[in-house]
Image (spheres, helix red, strand yellow):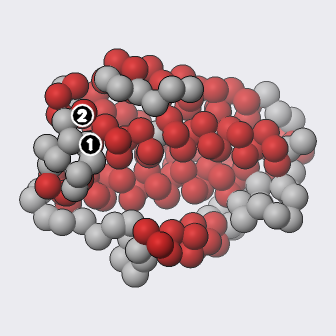
Amino acid sequence: MARPKNKTDLVQQSEKSFADLQSFIAGLSEAEQQHAFPAQYMNRNIRDVLGHIHAWHLLFLRWYEEGMAGRKPIMPAEGYTWKTTPDLNRMIQEKYSQTPLSDIQKLLLNSYQEVQIILAAHSEEELFTKKRYGWTGTSSLGQYLISATCSHYEWALRLIKKGTK
């Protein structure tokens, strides 16, 4: 899908991508939902992929809260840099590796809804004006939301489709 360039497209694409992901998973049997992915994938199953998205929702929500309060959020997370994101993603995978899929799905739905509230609360100008908020650097809030939502959901769906073949 093309990258959203306005609020309407971002809301619609975020909702559609999330719904497509949820629908695909719901259409799988219980055994398929628990199926282990091939060894080359860091995320070993659907639970890991959904845990990854949930964790990145939480990261975004922390950045947003701190940034909008006038502080400079540590990105991507305490002890990590953008260059060490693979290490962060491994830590996330380990963190949720013992959490049941049904629990991850509930956590993900809750964090998804929190992110959607933020998205809905902002005007198009607030979302797509670069450098509007000091904490987003040279980017726009919308770019952060695209990464945290539709881009991540589309990545997850592609990975799950590959992993469950």
Q: Which residue is mark 1?
A: 141
Residue at 82 percent across and 64 percent down: it is 40
Occupied quadrant, residue 116? top left
Residue at 47 percent across and 72 percent down: it is 83
Judge the density around disc 1: few (<14), some (14-19), many (≥20) Cα neighbours within 10 Å.
many
Residue 112 x/y as whole percent: 45, 40
Residue at 32 percent across and 23 percent down: it is 6
Classify the position of the C terminus by image quarter: top right
Q: Which residue is mark 2?
A: 127
Q: Marks 1 and 2, Cα distance to the nearest angstrom?
A: 5 Å
Task: Return the residue found at the far bottom.
Answer: 79
Of the image marks 1 and 2, the number of the one nearer the N terminus: 2
Occupied quadrant, residue 114? top left
Q: Is residue 93 above or below residue 36?
A: below
Q: Left or right: 78 with respect to 38?
A: left
Residue 95 in sight here: no
Q: Element at badge 1? A: helix
Q: How many marks?
A: 2
Judge the density around disc 2: few (<14), some (14-19), many (≥20) Cα neighbours within 10 Å.
many
Q: Amino acid at mark 1?
A: Leu
Callouts 1 and 2 close, C-beta under 8 Å: yes
Residue 58 x/y as whole percent: 41, 55
Q: Is residue 101 above or below residue 32?
A: below
Q: Is residue 107 above or below residue 125?
A: below
Q: Amino acid at mark 2?
A: Leu
Q: Nearer the viewer, residue 138 or 41?
A: 138
Residue 48 x/y as whole percent: 67, 57
